[in-house]
Every structure is written in C-alpha cells, then in structure tokens.
Image (cartoon, grey):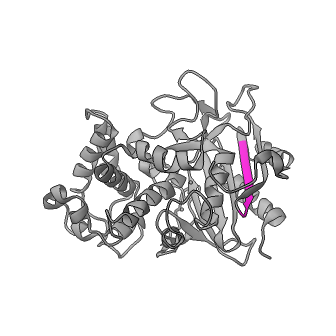
Amino acid sequence: MAMPGRRAVLALPGALAAAPAAAQQVASLDATLRPYLARHTLPALAAAVVRQGRVVASGAVGLRRWGTTIPVTINDAFHIGSDTKAMTALLLAQLVEAGRLRWDTPMAEAFPDLAGRMTVGLGAATLTQVMSHTSGLPADNDATDKLIAQSFEQPGNLDTVRAWFVGELVRLPLTSPPGTRFSYSNSGYVMLGALVERLTGRTWEEVVVERIFTPFGLRTAGFGPAASMGRVDATLGHIPGSPPKPMLAGPNGDNPLLIGPAGTVHLSVLDFARWAGWNAGLARRAPALVRPETLQRLQAPIVDITRPDAPPGTPPTGRYGLGWGWVRLPVSTEPFQFHAGSNEMNLAFIVLQPRFDFAMVAMTNIGGTEADTGLKALVTELYRRFGPAPA
C-alpha cells in the first residue's frame, strides 16, 4: 500500500527451498511487459510470478534512465517503498517470539523514558495498534514534515537520529483515540524501527541485513536509491512528466534515510519474488525466521480501510493487518494480500494468495497515477495467465 501524503514511501515488500534457477522452467515475461512501457510511459518494468516458492515466470524490460539506451537487466534493483513495512513488521515479530515484546505492549512500556512526555492517549497505544496504523499517530502532515527537516541537523548515526525523532513525535497530538480509526502513519513505522534499534542495540538497517537480507540471500538488496552515486548502475527513479525526469542518486533521489523502517529498501525483481514467495508460503519453507502462526498473525486483517482520496498505489478500500493489506480484485473470487510502495519516483506491487501459495511482484522506476494504472493492469494479466483461482 502506497504511503498517503507527501513523498510517499509508499503509503494501501537465497535460502528458499527451491530448485536452482538453471534447473527450473522459467517463462520469460519480456514480451508481455514491453507493450506496457509505451502504453503507460514507463522507463522500465519488471515482474515475476511465484508458485510454491518457485519463480515460474519473470522479466525486466526498458531503460534504467529515460532518454538513454542503458537497458535494465533482470538483476537490476528497483525501489520498493512501503513494501518495506512488512520487513519491519517481521523484525518486531521476531522480538515478540524472543520474549522482548508482546503484541499488546503499550508504547509507555516500550519507551519508558519517553512516557512522561507522550501526548494524551499514546502511552496506552499497543504495538499491534502502531503496526496496523490504528494508534492515532498522524499521517504525513506539516508537523511530521518539520520534524524530518529538523532531523538533518541532528548528530550521530541513524539510530540516534531516529531516537531524537521519536522523542519529538510522541509530543504531537493524536488524530484519533488508539484503536478507533485507520490512519496510515509512516512516522509510526519510524517509531517501530526505533524500537527495534532500542532492543537490539544496532541500527534498523543492520538488523534488516542480518535477519532478512542475509538469510534470504538477497544480494541485490540495499537502502535508498537503487543506483550508486554518480553512476547509472541500476534503475533511476523518475518523476512523471513529459518527458519523465530521471533522478540520480543523491539527496533528492529518495526519501530521507531516517524513514527507512517505513520504506527505503531496494532490490531486484527476483529477490523481491523470493521474499514474496516465502510470505505466500506462510513461513513453511526456509529460512525459519518466525513460526508459521506468527507470520499468519502479521498477515491477518485487523482494520477496514476507507480512503476515497487514496493516492496512487493505495487501495481506496480493503483491510490492513500488521505491515500487510488485503484487497479484492475482479480477476478472482479470492481476496489478495497486497501492498504497494512508492517514493513518488518508483512504484512496486507485491500481491499474494497464501491459500494457494501463490505470489506476484511488479516494479517500475516511475511514480504517479499512470504507473499505478499500468501495474494494476499487469498484475491482472499475469493472474489470468498464471493464477490458481477461477474468476
């Protein structure tokens, strides 16, 4: 689900027990993807389909940078924005299983040194409520934008800066009493990342690398812009326009790294598919990161979503769990577990049907409504070709 509001990281994401890629029958999606480039003004597009943890179809077409002849490859990284939230949720689930947290841990207990300065009601908000965007913490607004701007003046590593940010965030008034209303809060996920840092003694990025990237073998995964500074060695994000404007790695190439737990991960379509397939398989395959029942708890819908003004990538209706959303699409009678991610320069969809151990991922290096329309059409076409459930 894409992040609502400004500079969305959205806003509605190896060790898998699968046969070596060379031994699998993997259908090429390149011919399927190419027409979408011109139809929806996309610089590049990548997608993959996963059944029972195995990639059965994949492809990547288009250009790393609009106006050049530099083609994307199947191993090029794309930015996934708020699809990162499911990774942050998984880290918290590991801490719950380890006895360091409870699903009902209140924020006053999680941050005891901040309890005295917390705005009315926030201290009683639970871990589950923050993870499901029902804590009352604000969506992106002028106050949170101001804190993010001030964060650039803070010294220290990212964990220190996030601790400062949370110390200021907890003073802001809640938009609703905890547990009463869905309000998509990227700041809430920064708070969750700071909680991971507080309990592990390391930055959120270090913990993600150790507990997610490494166990899955996600060699293309990283944080911030997919391309290196001064190079076009991966996809560049693009601002929609005529023509699209490519954004090089740099201070404006992504959202601030402060909000990493809400959505700064990038990775290739095949690595994204590996992550998607594990989640669709409900942790029944390696790596054994949490118990299957714990992953099911993360995925289970908790709150209804009603957003008639939803930005691109965010469903106007559906349900939300803990880092995961659920939607219904005309292509199937079965609901889809879904999240989208966008920093307004990229867009990525992850679409699962755990009942069938089935997953799809789609990624493009441009944001906006036309990209959203294109990815929706693409996942519909892919499901009709490869999906397990009748329409």
Asked which quadrant contains residue 152, the reply is top left
Q: On the picture, is 258 further left or further right than 320? A: left
| Quadrant that contains the C terminus | bottom right
Q: On the picture, is 43 further left or further right than 111? A: right
| Image: 222 above or below 121 | above
Towards the viewer: 61 or 148: 61
Question: What residue appears at the point 25 percent right and 32 percent down from the top-left corner?
Answer: 155
Asked which quadrant contains residue 350, the reply is bottom right
Percent position (x, y) of residue 369? 63, 52
Task: Determine the main secondary structure of the stretch shown in magenta.
Answer: strand
Percent position (x, y) of residue 372? 65, 54
Q: On the picture, is 97 further left or further right than 77? A: left
Question: What residue appears at the point 81 percent right and 45 percent down from the top-left corner?
Answer: 22
Residue 9 seen anywhere in this rendered image of the structure: yes
Asked which quadrant contains residue 158, the reply is top left
Please count the marks in the image.
0
Towards the viewer: 57 or 7: 57
Towards the viewer: 374 or 77: 77
| Quadrant that contains the N terminus | bottom right
- Find the magenta span and give its range: 45-52
Check residue 87 for magenta coloring.
no
Percent position (x, y) of residue 55? 75, 54
| Image: 11 above or below 175 | above
